[in-house]
Image: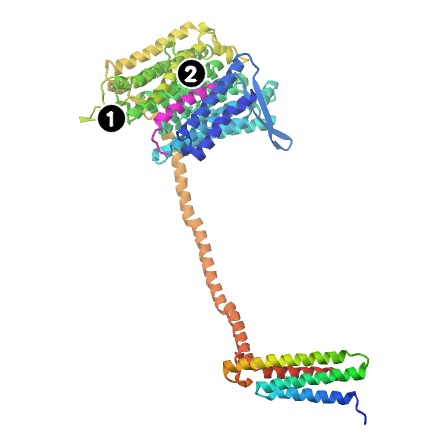
Amino acid sequence: MVITAWIIPLLPFLAFWLILFFGRRLPGRGAYVAIGAMLLAALASFRLFLHLAGGGEPLHSRLDWLVLGERALAVGIQVDALTTVMLLVVTVVGSMIFIYSVGYMHGEARYPRFFAYMSLFAASMLLLVLADNFLFLYVGWELVGLCSYLLIGFYFDRPAAARASMKAFIVTRIGDVFMFAGILLIFFTIGELGFEETFAAVEQGRLSGGLLTAVALLLFGGAVGKSAQVPLHVWLPDAMEGPTPVSALIHAATMVAAGVYLVARLFLIFFASPGHGALTVVAWVGGISALMAATIAVVQDDIKRVMAYSTISQLGYMMLGLGTLGFTAGIFHLMTHAFFKALLFLGAGSVIHAMGTNDIKRMGGLARVMPSTYWTMLIGGLALAGIFPLAGFWSKDEILTEAFHNNPPLFYLGLVTSFITAFYVMRVMFYTFLGERRWEQSHGQPGSAHPHESPRVMTVPLWILAIFAAFIGMLGAPFLGNPFHAFVRFENGEAVPFNVTVAALSTAVALAGIAAAAALYRWRVISPATVRRALQPLTVLAERKYYFDDLYALTVVRPVMWATRALRVFDLYVIDGAVNLLGAVVVWLTRLYRVFDLYVVDGVVNLLAWVTGRLGAALRYVQTGRAENYLLAIAVGVILIILGGLVR
Amino acid sequence: MTVGLTHYLVVAALLFGLGLYGILTRRNAVAILMGIELMLNAANINLVAFNRYVAPAAVAGHVFALVVITLAACEAAVGLALVMAVYRNLETIHVDEINLMKW
């Protein structure tokens, strides 16, 4: 069973290398390998899930990886209820998106590379959720960040995509630095990196008080970056430059949920901070992100950007749920959101695939043209809005119930967000699928778009995800005994029971949101432009995205650019000057050496040759070529030797 | 006056000197060969004389002298053949005109 757990991340990892090296020669140009590895990983995850759901013990396997002095860094994996939920979400949603990508990415350049990166991402994400220690977690964490960077910049020949990938990488890295500091703080306090040891230290009080809160907040910094929460949310909307399946898998369903997973995995650390201080911060950051992103989503015209802001908003919801002690609620929403947001993104991808544009104002009336996309997206949209009995209703309701009991101000914040959520998702639906066909006529000219339903390989995953989005919420339904809550729970806290009032209130609010959207965009009771003008300062604020990008441009980007320009001047005149000076000195020295070479070294060599030549010329007269001369010399020599011998 | 070893040695030395002189001064290659014969015979006289006066019982000196005579015959044959070959190629047997070895 433990072997199964180890195999899960290794399968996509193997697929990554295979596709990287042999991509074009593999079946389906690498796509089938990636899908196969993903499906096998899904099967293995399901086996682990059955093991745990059947009352089996949580699995744990570790080995000493590195011995630093007296400390051994133990690394390993663990499988508990939380892990299996994440494993299933990643592998099932991932498989669907992989299959969908076969259709969506058809004919793209670098097609095998896409599946290689996606496989690497899946492997990293699975490692991240399986890790039983901060080291593996951090490795997975950075690897998914890398994959995110690579895939956002997949169309790196588009400047916008290249910029977006850099922005995503740098902004999340800011959060990661905090997280790394938190991990180091834990390591230097207790000398261990395992989760179990850390929790034990928290329970024994070795890690407590202000230090514990500091650790929790530092770790939360990483989660804020990765899960795109305020104030580090600015990267996620830009990340939509990547291919749509990437947006669905990485920037909606799984990677951005890693931050929520982190808070859930380390819930004890947050929970134990004095007065739930850290949890309160989590809740408020989540709540503010939820409301802020939802309001921005209302004024976006790019279908993918609406979804991106919706993702930030929903991640905020999860954080809100976790922060108001709703451990199960947060994870439940993570799971349901993964399914319906992946569905919405893939649906959006299908629309983009057909229309060739992201602008919802240039769409309209697509329901007849692409019925599968329409109906699946409608299910996803209603699930997102939180309409009974779809998935979003149950999970969002649980979060609101927790907030209602533990933090009433945040409950009202969540309720307002719920209204706006229903409003913006229906606005997109009305603009895209209903109303007149604006693509047939643009500025009096016949439009160039010829939309069509997407191929089967794309619609089948849509339908499968739609089924999940419709029914997975039942796992948390109170009249079915709330099996999800029985499976995933936090021992120290008791969940708040189902509250009919809250449920009715949230449904009413969601319906009101839908009605408002219908009034504005379907029945045209009031013109949207009038409303926009009436709410002038607010709409401008939302359109400018609360000036976050401008703020960062002013405080970070501008000074950095100024500094680089200053450094460029420094480089040009000081560093280059020094280098050129060195060069000039060397050139001058070589001239000197040249003179030395010409007259001294060459002189000696030539002298030697001249002396040898003269000597040879002088001695050549000895060689007469006459044997008798040589013989005479021999005879004289012999006589001289004999005489010499006699004299001596 | 009895004839002793010294007399033989003096005769041999004179003969050797004459042979050497002939080799060094004659231009004709045949004459040079004859000079070589004289020098070889001077050596023969020495060998026989030493055998007679120093070790009368042994015959090694005689044998050596016979070997040298055989050698001289061979040398004369080879030498004359060389002279013939040189004459055919250069149309002269005057050694001062045979200067192919010169630089």
Of A272 and A257, nearer the camera is: A257
Mark 2 — residue?
A336
Give the amino acid type for the residue marked by disc 1 in the picture: Ala
Q: How many other residues sit within 10 Å of disc 1, few (<14), some (14-19) or many (≥20)?
A: some
Q: Does residue A106 show up magenta in the picture?
A: yes
Q: Which residues are magenta?
A: A87-109
The x and y percentages for residue A295 are 34, 20
Magenta span main SS: helix
Q: Could you tell me if the residues under marks 2 and 1 are in contact, i.e. CB atoms within 8 Å?
A: no
- In the structure shown, which secondary structural element does the residue marked by tag 2 occupy? helix
Q: Nearer the viewer, mark 2 or mark 1?
A: 1
Q: How busy is the neighbourhood of tag 2: few (under 14 within 10 Å), some, or many (20 plus)?
A: many
Quadrant of the drawing holding the N terminus of chain A: top right
Q: Nearer the viewer, residue A577 or A506?
A: A506
Q: Quadrant of residue A94?
A: top left
**Same-chain status of marks 2 and 1:** yes
Does A67 sit above or below residue A331?
below
Residue A264 lies in the magenta stretch: no
Mark number for residue A449?
1
Q: What chain does badge 1 belong to?
A: A
Residue A203 place in picture, x, y as percent: 59, 18
Check disc 2 and give the amino acid type: Thr
Q: Which mark is residue A633?
A: none
